[in-house]
Amino acid sequence: MNLRKLINPKLIAVITVIFTVFASTSVFAQAAADVTVKPVDMDAIYKSISYYVLLFVLLCMFVAIIGKALKIYELTQAVQDKPKAINWNVVHGVLFMIFMVVGLYGVYWEYTVHGNMTLPEAASIHGAKIDNMFNITLILTTIVFILTHIVLFGFAYKYKNDGSRAKAYFYPHNNAIERIWTIVPAVVLTVLVLMGFLTWRSIFFKNEDPNNKPIAIEVISSQFQWDIRYAGADKLIGLRNYKLITGTNTTGIDFKDKNSWDDQRADEIVLPVNKAVRFTLTSKDVIHSFYMPHFRVQMNTVPGMISNFEFTPTITTAEMKTKTNNPAFSYVLLCAKICGSSHYNMKKTVRVVSEEEYQEWLLKQQPYLNNDLRAEFKLPLVAEVAVSDPIKKDSTLTANQPALKK
Ligand SMILES: [Cu+2]
């Protein structure tokens, strides 16, 4: 066999590519081993950054070497007066198609894999409406996304210059198409915006029924905790004033206001199912954000400003445990503002229970107004009772009777 025939430019190109792949892989493997084995005096973050930078540089070099090898191959073809072996327009057209198929599969994967990691069904009346809106928007944008991308990549493939046409077709204007792609999105967006506006209004503007007042709870944020105050029997939260904040009166409740006398302190948020609850939100120091994802509730708490959020929970914690098939499930209150170094600590359990369980829990909560505060506000003192004894504690409520006679 003629050796000259055997060692042709094609073979050289193939050998170069194989050698490059082998060399790059071994260099890469060595570099990776160096990063993991050698103790480097740098943070893990820097390590991972340099690792990926190195990986990127190697990848670029790999692509550049393949490019050069192909270029040499093409030049040798030209020198030998042979026809062009690679039509790059066809290669690009095919790459566009591959990119589209892989990309659309990626979208499918994202929807199914990460889609399953999203929040469970909304546990409030308004939450269902918000989810509905999100779903409609997601369905519409997904349809538009898929269609436009099929057209985009499909055109790049179909109309690639494969040598069959000498000149591209010039198509500057079409009024009918312009009308369609202006009017259809305008109508769809108007419907979506109106839907959002009406939903927002139904959440924030409610007609108060004086005979069926929502449960009133005040939540005050501070670095890094939530102070929770239930309104007590009168369903009215007493006034607050930041000037009254002291070591004993940490949130500055104004006990000259009789509405404050029966207000109760709570460590967790417990809500009865299917009963409207109105949160009064404010902050002591910086802006925090009152965020209860399972109820689709989020509102900033701003120092010097009072905001309200009223909603009705519809699923108890026990029911949600069954629905999510997760015995450890619990609703949470989080802070959704990066408010400082211990921001991550601002988590509280929220429990949604039956009406009876709620009343039972409420009886066990202590009133804010203790004897220290009574002394501070020059109110008559009452006999102190152990917290742990519910029967005696009930008598504390009786002792608080002057507070209820407003
Ligand atoms: Cu916070």
Image (cartoon, rainbow, N blue to C red):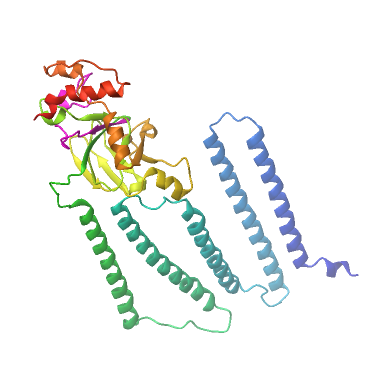
Q: Which residues are magenta?
A: 225-253
Q: Which of the 4 image quarters holds residue 80?
A: bottom right
Q: Residue at 50% x, 58% y: name it.
A: 112
Q: Quadrant of residue 198?
A: bottom left
Report the image quarter containing ligand 1: top left
Q: Where is residue 129 shown, x and y percent of the image?
A: 30, 57
122 relative to 402 in the view: left or right: right
> Can you give x and y, in whole percent of width and height, for residue 256 in the image?
10, 25
Q: Identify which residue is drawn at 63% across, 29% down.
A: 39
Say left or right for 313 vs 114: left
Depicted 323 relative to depicted 10: above or below? above
| Rendered position, 184 above or below 103 | below
Residue 166: where, in percent of width, then height? 53, 84
Quarter holding the N terminus is bottom right
Q: Position of residue 302 (x, y in %)?
A: 23, 38
| Residue 381 within the segment the image draws in magenta | no
Near-viewer residue (297 or 55): 297
The residue sitting at 38% across, 67% down in the picture is: 140
Q: Is residue 281 visible?
A: no
Extreme-left residue of the structure? 406
The reply to whether residue 291 is in sight is: yes
Main secondary structure type of the part rendered in magenta: loop
Q: Quadrant of residue 214?
A: top left
Q: Is residue 252 one of those drawn in magenta?
A: yes
The C terminus lies in quadrant: top left
Q: Name the outermost residue toward the right.
A: 1
Residue nearest the viewer, comparing 351 with 25 = 351
